[in-house]
Amino acid sequence: MQLADALMTQPSSLNDALVAELHRHFSDTQLAELTVDIMKWNYQKVSVALGVDDEVAPGKLTPLVFDERGNWMR
Amino acid sequence: MSDFDARAGRIFGPDSDLLVELTAAHDAAAASVDASLLDVCRQRMAMLLGAPIADARSDLAAWPSSPDYSLAERACLAFTEQFVIDVASLDDDCADAVAEHLGRDGLAAFCSALLVEEQRLRLELIWTRLGL
């Protein structure tokens, strides 16, 4: 979560302790894949920027459902 | 091949599907927007994110008061700043100002191109921080 926060706000703000902690839990390849997986959700910025990000269910939370490959099912 | 693509190739492998997709997205972005316009906005995004910039325009941080930026550049730079800092605060006036110069389709293309450039900048920064 802290990695996601840093990536979405100020990537250079990731502190040394967190970097070390991440490397304790994940390999370099896993970390790289995590960063790309997090960044792909940034696509929503285009809809927000263009003002076309209507709520799926106005006034309600929208459940996110994923298929067996991890792809979001609309 | 760009530095980003070379780095992504080293991390994920030169023949990875991901590298192909990342490169294709960047090529599509570059083809959809005026190159110099996108470049100045990319430079501004890099400044805001604290990324190193090569050949940055020396007066870019002062673009609001500099006479050297066109109306189109000003509209796009204002949009770019909001896009990076707080996209949810982007208002219609800011988007309309860009559309006035690029058209509605051009605004959408510009927005998508900004996303691609921003993603690359953020990934490069985080990969550097992670030592990848």
Image (tube, coloured by chain):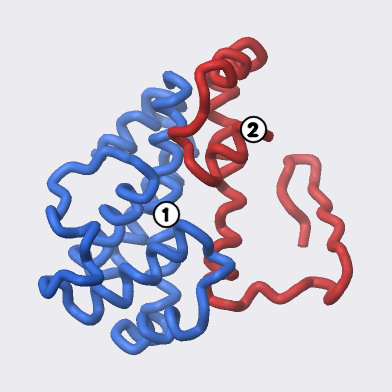
Q: Is residue A42 left or right of residue B113?
A: right
Q: Is residue A33 left or right of residue A53?
A: left
**Residue B13 shows in the view:** no
Residue at coordinates 43% horizontally, 19% vertically from top-left? B131
Q: Which chain has been coloured red in this picture?
A: A
- The quadrant holding residue B19 is top left
Q: Looking at the picture, which amino acid does disc 1 mark?
A: Val
Q: Is residue A26 shown left or right of residue B127?
A: right
In the picture of the structure, the residue carrying the numbered disc 1 is: B116
Q: Which element carries disc 2, helix, strand or loop?
A: helix
Q: What is the quadrant of residue B4 in the picture? A: top left
Residue nearer the viewer, A22 or A12: A12
- Specify the subunit that label 2 lies on: A
Which quadrant is home to the N terminus of chain A? top right
Compared to residue A62, the image places residue B75 above or below, namely below
The Cα atoms of the two marked residues, 2 and 1, are separated by 23 Å
Residue at image location 16% in from the left, 50% down from the top: B56
Percent across and percent down for residue A15 are: 52, 24
Label 1: element kind: helix
* Amino acid type at image mark 2: Gln
In the image, B43: left or right of A18? left
Q: Quadrant of residue B115?
A: bottom left
Disc 2: which residue: A2
Residue B103 visible from this viewpoint: yes
